Image (spheres, rainbow, N blue to C red):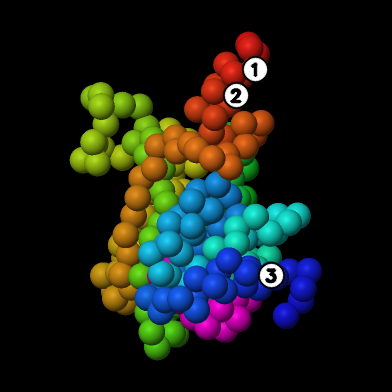
Amino acid sequence: RDVERSRGLGDVYKRQKQERPVLMRCVILGGGGFLGRHIGRAMAAEGAEVWSVDRYLPAAQIAPWLAGEFQADCFDLSAWWDLVGGADVIVHLASSTVPATASEDPLGDVQANLVGTLRLLRDLRNKAARPRLLFASSGGAVYGRPQSVPLSESHPTMPMGAYGATKLAIEHYLRIEEAQHGLPVRILRLSNPYGEWQQPHGVQGVIAVFAHRALHSMP
């Protein structure tokens, strides 16, 4: 393996793996973000062998519960599938856009995220063992302008921006994949998640941004 593009087991994880059997192998696409770290830590604590695939590797090992992490195209199954030994569960957190950037370049958003996911689904059909796939959609952007508050999952989906439209399109294609090819999928519509490891200086994560500014007496 290219050491600049991957990292192996951390000492903490090695000890845990020796102490108890592995229940399942989980691969988190976009596992370098704060959500991926929380999910990875929780799954490792339950006995899963957890791998992270992301476009970037952090400068230092900050997730010792990982079996390993790879810098690769998340949607290119050939770049990581054999290296991790396959997967029982894939957690799809990968996205190259946020609402603002998706609206600035909707074609790029579709090419990177929708077409990328379709490539992943196509290649998974060739695997003898079909993993379960969990997709992180949007708990706000797919609905558009609220017709009632609070929103429920039965609320009409009428996205008002490119980001929500792409997320919703991915949801539909996942349901088609499950119906036509038997891939088990679950969709979570997350709304403004926040927590430890979230960066308060980016263009996404309004709660983290507001909390950071309030704590530092910033406008």
Q: Are marks 3 and 1 in contact (CB under 8 Å)?
A: no
Name the N-terminal-most of marks 3 and 2.
3
- Badge 1 marks a residue whose secondary structure is loop
Residue position marked by numbered label 1 in the rendering: 216
The amino acid type of the residue labelled 1 equals: His
Image label count: 3
Residue drawn at 29 percent across, 76 percent down: 182
Nearer-the-camera pick, 121 or 20? 20
Residue position marked by numbered label 3 in the rendering: 7
**Distance of mark 1 from mark 2, alpha carbons?**
6 Å
Q: Position of residue 10 (x, y in %)?
A: 63, 68
Residue drawn at 50 percent across, 27 percent down: 207
Span of residues in magenta: 79-91
98 shown above or below 188: above
Q: Residues within 10 Å of mark 2 (few under 14, many from 20)?
A: some
Name the quarter where the N terminus is drawn.
bottom right
Name the quarter where the C terminus is drawn.
top right
Residue position marked by numbered label 2 in the rendering: 212
Name the N-terminal-most of marks 3 and 1.
3
Residue drawn at 35 percent across, 27 percent down: 145
Nearer-the-camera pick, 216 or 70? 216
**Distance of mark 3 from mark 2, alpha carbons?**
31 Å
Q: Examine the image and state in which quarter residue 6 appears.
A: bottom right
Q: Are marks 1 and 2 in contact (CB under 8 Å)?
A: yes
